[in-house]
Image (cartoon, helix red, strand yellow):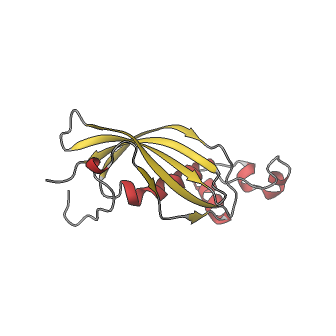
Amino acid sequence: MSAHRPVMGRWFEDLTPGLVIDHAITRTVTEADNTLFSVMTMNPAALHLDAAFAETTEFGERLVNSLFTLSLLIGLSVYETTHGTTVANLGFEEIAFPTPVFHGDTIHAQTEVVSARESSSRPNQGIVVFEHRAFNQRDELVARCRRSALMNRRPA
């Protein structure tokens, strides 16, 4: 690992099962976020992009693209968990969106370490399973996922 690379995340040894991190950074989702993400990922769903159509749905307004919500959730967690200490994401599972996100919602995130084990093939690394949770300004759960990451051990 380069000595010049910033490390702000936690090392494998710091990520003990049961640890809960309430992330300091929050983010208000804008119409521009939703529109840009939807068109960049070639998602033409009217529920995300067409205000007139969305008004006729049970929600009465456009919903934020759920994959933007997932991306934001992971991004909000990086600084205090894996920034500069992760090798790779190994997988995402158990992704759920129990409450919709709307333009103007402010999202905050929380991460819990579900499990951590040493890598059997890489002695300087370990595998950590995180559960990331996103909440809106009313503290309603809007997204949840489990992410497995290959993490570096603290340098000797």
Q: Position of residue 60 (x, y in %)?
A: 82, 53
Q: Residue at x 33, y 45 (%)?
A: 16
Question: Is 16 or 152 nearer to us in this picture?
Answer: 16
**Could you tell me which quadrant the N terminus lies in?**
bottom left
Question: Is 75 or 155 nearer to us in this picture?
Answer: 155
109 w.r.t. 88: above or below: below
Which residue occupies the extreme right position in the image? Answer: 56
* Residue 104, image quadrant: bottom right
Q: Position of residue 134 (x, y in %)?
A: 56, 52
* Residue 9, image quadrant: bottom left
Q: Residue at x 28, y 47 (%)?
A: 12
Question: Is 138 or 152 nearer to us in this picture?
Answer: 138
- 155 to the left or right of 36: left
Q: Position of residue 66 (x, y in %)?
A: 62, 48
Which residue occupies the extreme top position in the image? Answer: 120
Q: Residue at x 65, y 65 (%)?
A: 30
Count of numbered badges drawn on the protein: 0
* Residue 62, image quadrant: bottom right
Which residue occupies the extreme front position in the image? Answer: 18
Q: Position of residue 94 (x, y in %)?
A: 52, 36
- 56 to the left or right of 13: right
